[in-house]
Image: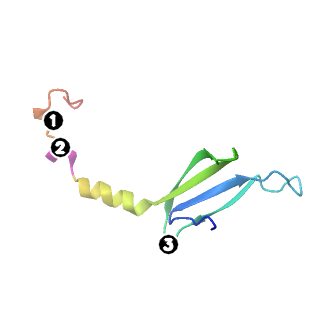
Amino acid sequence: MAFELKDGEGSLWRITEKKEGDDRDYNGSIKITKPGEYWLSGHVNTTKAGKKYLKLTAKPKQAQAERREDQGDRDSVFPADILPFSPLL
């Protein structure tokens, strides 16, 4: 059974045998099913066989902006005047 990428995930693998000097250093793929702008993160992982690769994760930029809007104004939730440890005092 082949490895199947989840939506918003991918991987980059180091190319060990370059054909030309200016050939790319890594290749791989990422699966993104919805159009738009994404934040891209990379984490160094190691396979069970000991081969290192870069695991990629893509998260929609719009989703992060929507979360901020849902949180609303923090002062209305945590008024600075009732929190003695607030840095706003």
Q: Which label was assigned to residue 35?
A: 3
In the image, residue 75 lies at what x, y percent? Answer: 18, 43
Rounded to the nearest angstrom, the CA distance separating label 3 from label 2 is: 35 Å
Rounded to the nearest angstrom, the CA distance separating label 1 from label 2 is: 7 Å
Amino acid type of the residue that numbered disc 1 sits on in the rendered structure: Ala
Tell me, yes or no, whether the two marked residues, 1 and 2, touch with CB atoms within 8 Å. yes
Q: As rendered, which of 77 and 19 lies closer to the eye?
A: 19
Name the outermost residue toward the front: 1
Residue shown at the point (53%, 68%) measured from the top left: 32
In the image, residue 55 lies at what x, y percent? Answer: 59, 52
How many C-alpha atoms fall within 10 Å of the one at disc 3: few (<14), some, or many (≥20)? Answer: few
Residue 5 vertical position relative to residue 77 in the rendered view, above or below: below
* Horizontal arrangement in the rendering, residue 9 relative to residue 16 (left or right): left
Residue shown at the point (89%, 58%) measured from the top left: 19
How many C-alpha atoms fall within 10 Å of the one at disc 1: few (<14), some, or many (≥20)? Answer: some
The mark that comes first in sequence, 3 or 1, is 3
Q: As rendered, which of 65 and 20 lies closer to the eye?
A: 20
Q: Which label was assigned to residue 75?
A: 2
Q: Secondary structure at mark 1?
A: helix
Secondary structure mostly seen in the magenta stretch? helix
From the viewer's perspective, is the residue at label 3 or at label 2 nearer? 3
Q: Report which residue position mark 1 lands on.
A: 80
The mark that comes first in sequence, 1 or 2, is 2
Q: As rendered, which of 32 and 52 lies closer to the eye?
A: 52
Bounds of the magenta segment = 73-77
